[in-house]
């Protein structure tokens, strides 16, 4: 935990912060913070800064906080993700929070098992906890928005434009494609949407429907990656491309 995330309910009338549970336990057992020391803190959805430890006893942490700095810049990327295996989703969601994704739509697909929709991983509280873990790791404070859609075609035809907008560059990593990521206009795109299929890939109908709605297919190379590997690889490549563009402009 590289950042203690604070919520409105943590603040006391005198302006100090009081925490119990997992965060207080971490501060005591892992950070071993003593009164007078400072910890990195951030308010959920707001600024980051420091917290002076006033009290750190079993089960209770009290801080005097100073919030002065903005969280890390956003990635400018949204994600349309066919729901992966629950174990994989438990790894993907913290990763997308760490990497600054703004919005994730978890969607059904032909190769998504119906049982996945019954998994506790899709419960809103469980999703939020995974995202918070990612924010704590990355020292970020802004939660990605996560939506779940059980019907692929109605989502693409009726909701996609409203949720992702019409100006973002739409990208479709798809093994049959040949052109690399560098040739699909990433250099000039202020925002992007990635459509990542399940481990078995999008079926032809799904890929064709996405292409008909403006998604550009491209190749990640000859290796076939699992979803939990492909998502951070893709986000990392986009970040590097943007850094290169920033250095040359």
Image: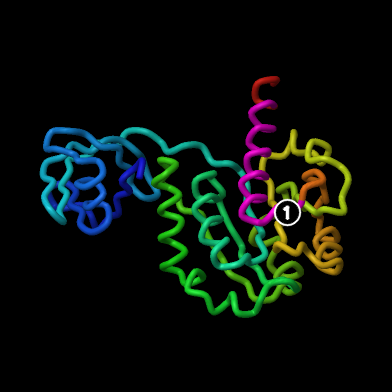
The N terminus is located in which quarter?
top left
Q: In this rendering, is residue 238 above or below 215?
A: above
Element carrying mark 1? loop
Task: Point out residue 47 in the picture as x, y percentages from the top left corner.
Answer: 36, 40
Question: Relative to the observer, which residue lies in front, 98 or 246?
Answer: 98
Q: How many marks?
A: 1
The furthest residue to the top:
248
Task: Point out residue 64 in the picture as x, y percentages from the top left corner.
Answer: 17, 40
Task: Point out residue 74 in the picture as x, y percentages from the top left corner.
Answer: 54, 41
Tell me the colour scheme of the image: rainbow
Residue found at x 78% / y 40%? 181
- Residue carrying label 1: 166
Question: Relative to the observer, which residue lies in front, 76 or 221?
Answer: 221
Region in magenta = 224-244
The quadrant in which residue 117 appears is: bottom right
Residue found at x 45% / y 69%? 124
In reply to whether residue 227 is colored magenta, the answer given is: yes
Q: Is residue 154 left or right of residue 218?
A: left
Q: In this rendering, is residue 103 above or below 148?
A: above
Q: Is residue 7 left or right of residue 19?
A: right
Question: Relative to the observer, which residue lies in front, 42 or 174?
Answer: 174
Residue found at x 70% / y 70%? 155
Q: In this rendering, is residue 229 above or below 71?
A: below
Question: Relative to the observer, which residue lies in front, 235 or 16?
Answer: 235
Residue found at x 15% / y 53%? 60
In reply to whether residue 249 is colored magenta, the answer given is: no
């Amino acid at each position: 935990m590289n950042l203690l995330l604070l919520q409105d309910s943590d603040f006391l009338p005198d302006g100090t912060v009081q925490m119990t549970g997992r965060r207080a336990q971490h501060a005591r057992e892992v950070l071993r913070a003593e009164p007078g020391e400072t910890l990195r803190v951030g308010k959920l959805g707001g600024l980051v800064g420091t917290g002076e430890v006033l009290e750190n006893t079993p089960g209770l942490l009290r801080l005097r906080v100073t919030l002065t700095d903005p969280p890390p810049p956003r990635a400018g990327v949204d994600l349309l993700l066919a729901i992966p295996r629950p174990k994989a989703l438990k790894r993907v969601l913290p990763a997308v929070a760490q990497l600054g994704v703004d919005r994730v739509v978890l969607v059904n697909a032909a190769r998504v098992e119906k049982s996945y929709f019954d998994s506790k991983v899709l419960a809103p509280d469980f999703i939020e906890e995974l995202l918070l873990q990612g924010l704590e790791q990355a020292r970020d404070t802004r939660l990605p928005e996560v939506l779940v859609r059980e019907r692929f075609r109605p989502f693409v035809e009726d909701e996609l434009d409203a949720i992702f907008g019409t100006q973002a560059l739409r990208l479709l990593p798809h093994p049959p494609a040949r052109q690399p990521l560098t040739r699909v206009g990433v250099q000039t795109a202020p925002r992007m949407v990635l459509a990542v299929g399940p481990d078995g890939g999008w079926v032809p109908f799904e890929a064709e429907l996405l292409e008909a709605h403006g998604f550009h297919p491209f190749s990640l190379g000859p290796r076939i990656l699992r979803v939990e590997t492909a998502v951070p690889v893709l986000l990392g490549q986009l970040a590097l491309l943007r850094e290169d563009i920033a250095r040359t402009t």
